[in-house]
Image (tube, helix red, strand yellow):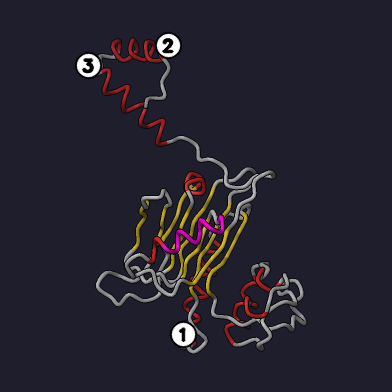
């Protein structure tokens, strides 16, 4: 389908002929495709739009039918942007499934064990708002979306477990800090994922970062790291702000 009006086509055809262009129809078709390529993306957020953004650790999507299962649950909850941890897909890429959702993924190199891995599953509407994305590593992937007033950048993460070595944890947070600092200052910033952190209910000294509704377990080392990271970057840990049943925390 060409996005050129009849009047514009006649005028453009005359200009091409004057310029000595032989294959006018081909040039017009190329021009139409270029317009389609540069069509401005739709807007993800606006004052009247309600968009659900969520993240799950799916344990694995390296099983037959698991991707379809996750997408069905995503549709059932009405989620527009779903961050996924522990996908276990190797390499990185972008694909579109039969139901119309777009999957972005970043994992280990080809030939390595199917471990870790992060990604996004975008609804049809959210995929139209996507400006750019970057597969950072098997633990971090970045996306940026067009919005009504400010662009939205989302970093989906899968942090090392509490039993991991200090070196592995330091490398992860150093990399996460580096890519967060590259986000334009006017963007809405969302850092989400499976951080393998226990925050606890005691937010003394960190009231601006942590709410009072964390899990009852005491804050572990990963929780300390995550709280310090959020405090340094003026982020709030949303999972601790609202009351939930203990089994849902």
> Which residue occupies the extreme left position in the image?
22
Q: Residues within 10 Å of mark 3 (few under 14, many from 20)?
A: few
Answer whether labels 2 and 3 touch (C-beta < 8 Å). no
Residue drawn at (53%, 74%), measured in percent from left and top? 194
Return the mark for residue 7.
2
Which range is magenta? 69-78
Mark closer to the chain start, 2 or 3: 2
Nearer the viewer's eye, disc 2 or disc 1?
2
Where on the picture, by quarter, is residue 235? Answer: bottom right
Residue at the spot of label 3: 22
In this rendered view, identify the residue nearer to me: 20 or 48. 48
Question: How many numbered circles does the render carry?
Answer: 3
**Relative to 80, residue 218 above or below:** below
Return the mark for residue 103.
none
User: Residue 2, percent across and down?
Assistant: 37, 25
Position of the N terminus, as image quadrant, is: top left
Residue at the spot of label 1: 167
């Amino acid at each position: 389908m060409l996005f050129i009006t009849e009047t514009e086509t006649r005028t453009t055809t005359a200009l091409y002929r004057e310029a000595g262009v032989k294959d006018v129809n081909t040039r017009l078709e190329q021009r139409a495709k270029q317009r389609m390529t540069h069509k401005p993306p739709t807007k993800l957020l606006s004052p009247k739009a309600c968009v659900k953004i969520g993240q799950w650790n799916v344990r694995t999507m390296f099983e037959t039918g698991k991707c379809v299962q996750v997408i069905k649950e995503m549709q059932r909850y009405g989620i527009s942007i779903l961050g996924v941890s522990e996908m276990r897909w190797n390499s990185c890429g972008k694909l579109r499934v039969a139901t119309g959702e777009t999957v972005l993924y970043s994992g280990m190199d080809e030939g390595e064990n199917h471990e870790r891995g992060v990604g996004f599953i975008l609804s049809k509407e959210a995929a139209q708002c996507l400006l750019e994305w970057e597969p950072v590593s098997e633990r971090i992937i970045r996306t940026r979306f067009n919005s009504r007033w400010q662009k939205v950048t989302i970093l989906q993460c899968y942090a090392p477990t509490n039993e991991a070595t200090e070196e592995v944890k330091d490398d992860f947070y150093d990399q996460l800090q580096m890519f967060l600092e590259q986000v334009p200052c006017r963007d809405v910033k969302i850092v989400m994922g499976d951080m393998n952190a226990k925050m606890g209910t005691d937010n003394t000294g960190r009231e601006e970062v942590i709410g009072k509704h964390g899990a009852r377990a005491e804050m572990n080392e990963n929780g300390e790291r995550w709280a310090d990271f959020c405090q340094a970057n003026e982020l709030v840990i949303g999972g601790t702000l609202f009351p939930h049943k203990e089994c849902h925390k």
